[in-house]
Image: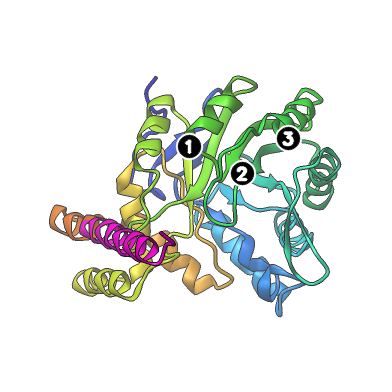
Amino acid sequence: MTSTATYDRTKLGGTFAFPGASRTVHRMGYGAMQLAGPGVFGPPRDPDAAAAVLREAIAAGVNHIDTSDFYGPHVTNQIIKKALHPYPNGLVIVTKVGARRGNDKSWIHDVTRKNLIDSVHDNLRNLGLEVLDVVNLRVGGVEKPSEGSIAEPLAVLVELKRQGLIRHIGLSNVTPTQLAEAESLTKIACVQNLYNVAHRDDDAFIDDLARQGIAYVPFFPLGGFNPLQSAALDAVAASLGTTPMQVALAWLLQRSSNILLIPGTSSVQHLRENLAAAELTLPAEMLARLDAIALESEGARKRNERVDNYENESSADW
């Protein structure tokens, strides 16, 4: 199967149709996480400014918003509802479940049946919807996936889908093995993992998903860069007269046609800068320089592993 995406850089990076769905979105979307207060907890300092960012995104043509009811908790979804409801035709709101927030602002991984069911109903209520377009099951570690069966929590979402509360199911922080297990239970619309120009563990995974027509939604487009990597990205941005964030987003759009972006911000100005990245075409020589960031990072990682292994062996008891 080939990707269902169509490419048109003049309109927010082109479009992508979710597999088996009538839902088509522009590839440049918006992530609502930063609309909550500091630490993604409690209300924002300026609720009107948060609503203005959402309205600006819709006015610019964004029709894919990523959110979760554990942002706040509840706060972000309530802002979305207040700012945009009744929702414009064609808007796809993607949410995620599998965690909850502690009173101490902690993030608690929770894929119990009760929490998953409660979370879906919380999303429905706070977004003012009767059915959720896409629900991602959040599994794995804080940043990277961890192997293990996801059949039990996924079965809960499949049940809620049969009840008509969910249209499509996605996965967050998963491995190819877990995707294969999931697809034996239900059709998967999208995968959301950590990926950017410097952290490319999912290169082969993305290519495989593209062949299946499944969307890949990277989080942390600038997350985890070391100083040398940041300097290399800064140099490319300076040579193009743009920002590092715009370069990182443009690189992702050019990386594969099944990649959907959800950069988040609480600033209208930063939103405009992010959306403008869809108009940026990176020339071949710049792509090569950016690819070198990942190669250098992989080389450094392997060198560090060799040093660690040597030190561990040297300090071992004989």
SS for tag 3? helix
Image quadrant where residue 237 sits: bottom left
Residue 164 visible in image: yes
The residue drawn where x is 84% and y is 48% is 125
Residues drawn in magenta: 292-318
The three-letter code of the residue at mark 3 reads Pro
In percent of width and height, residue 48 lies at 70, 73
Where is mark 2, residue-wise?
A: 91
**Foreground disc of the pair 2, 1:** 1
**Residue 227, above or below 112:** below
Q: Left or right: where does residue 282 sit relative to residue 95?
A: left
Secondary structure beneath dot 1 equals strand
Please say if 195 is above or below 120.
below
**Is residue 57 magenta-colored?**
no
Mark found first going from the N terminus, 1 or 3: 3
Q: Which mark is residue 215?
A: 1
Q: Residue at x 27, y 63 (%)?
A: 300
Q: Are marks 1 and 3 in contact (CB under 8 Å)?
A: no
The disc label shown at residue 266, or none? none
| Dot 3 crowding, Cα within 10 Å, few <14, some 14–19, many 20+ | some
Distance from disc 1 to disc 3, alpha carbons, whole Å, reads 21 Å
Whether residue 47 is situated above or below residue 21 in the rendered picture = below
Classify residue 36 as left or right of residue 269.
right
The residue nearer to you, when weighing 108 against 290, is 108
The secondary element bearing badge 2 is classed as: loop
Task: Tell us which disc is closer to us: 1 or 3.
Answer: 3
Q: Quadrant of residue 259?
A: top left
Q: Nearer the viewer, mark 2 or mark 3?
A: 3
Q: CA distance from mark 2 to mark 3?
A: 27 Å
Task: Compute the Cα span from label 2 to label 1.
Answer: 17 Å
Q: Dot 3 corresponds to which residue?
A: 153
